[in-house]
Amino acid sequence: MGDPKRHRRKYVTPTRPWDRVRLEKEVEIIIKYGLRNKRELWRFQNILRKYRRVARELLAKIDLPGKEGELAKAKAQMVIKKLAKIGVLEENATLDDILNLNVDAFLNRRLQTIVFRQGLANTIKQARQLITHGHIAIDGRKVTVPSHIVTRDEETKISYYSNSPFAERGLVVKVEEQEAS
């Protein structure tokens, strides 16, 4: 199992480190999603790579006769269900849809991106800062990890943490809107 104190890398570095086209694409993605460094991008690329590998293996086994084919179909449904719960795929997706995924699908499900898109922060960088400083909560529970993958169920439960000064400001704005109408 390994030493619990030693962390394993959860990413794979590129084989060609100075490829200009790849470097330019990475910089665009990092700016768009407000990532801290390229390791965060590589980690999500690795997650995508694993799901695509599983989908390829299941596609090869799904047409086999007997018990093996049935088991592959059940595993395929479990993988699709998990990705649908995360919000990366639709409920009625197929294994081919997993092969068509790109890293943007996973980066859009990060807490930092969702906080920015919901308007709780003015910029993507401010969203990261609010999360790391403990101003954002999911279902009343403080979350301080910007790369937290938000499921579809949790998406509507994102708000300011109750002890945060931003929560008081949010309440004042809501009260003023109610008085105006």
Image (spheres, helix red, strand yellow):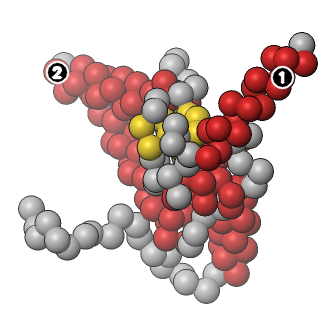
**Numbered label attached to residue 67:** 2
Residue contact at pointers 1 and 2, CB within 8 angstroms: no
Q: Residue at left 68%, top 61%?
A: 125
Q: Residue at left 26%, top 69%?
A: 8
Q: Quadrant of the N terminus?
A: bottom left
Q: Residues within 10 Å of mark 1 (few under 14, many from 20)?
A: few
Mark 1 residue type = Glu
Mark 2 residue type = Lys
Residue 36, quarter of picture: bottom right
- Considering only vertical position in the picture, is 8 above or below 181? below
| Mark whose residue sits in front, 1 or 2 | 1
Task: Tell me if residue 78 can be seen.
Answer: yes
Q: Residue at left 60%, top 60%?
A: 129
Secondary structure at numbered mark 1: helix
Measured from the top left, where is residue 75 in percent x and y?
Answer: 29, 28
Measured from the top left, where is residue 181 in percent x and y?
Answer: 89, 13
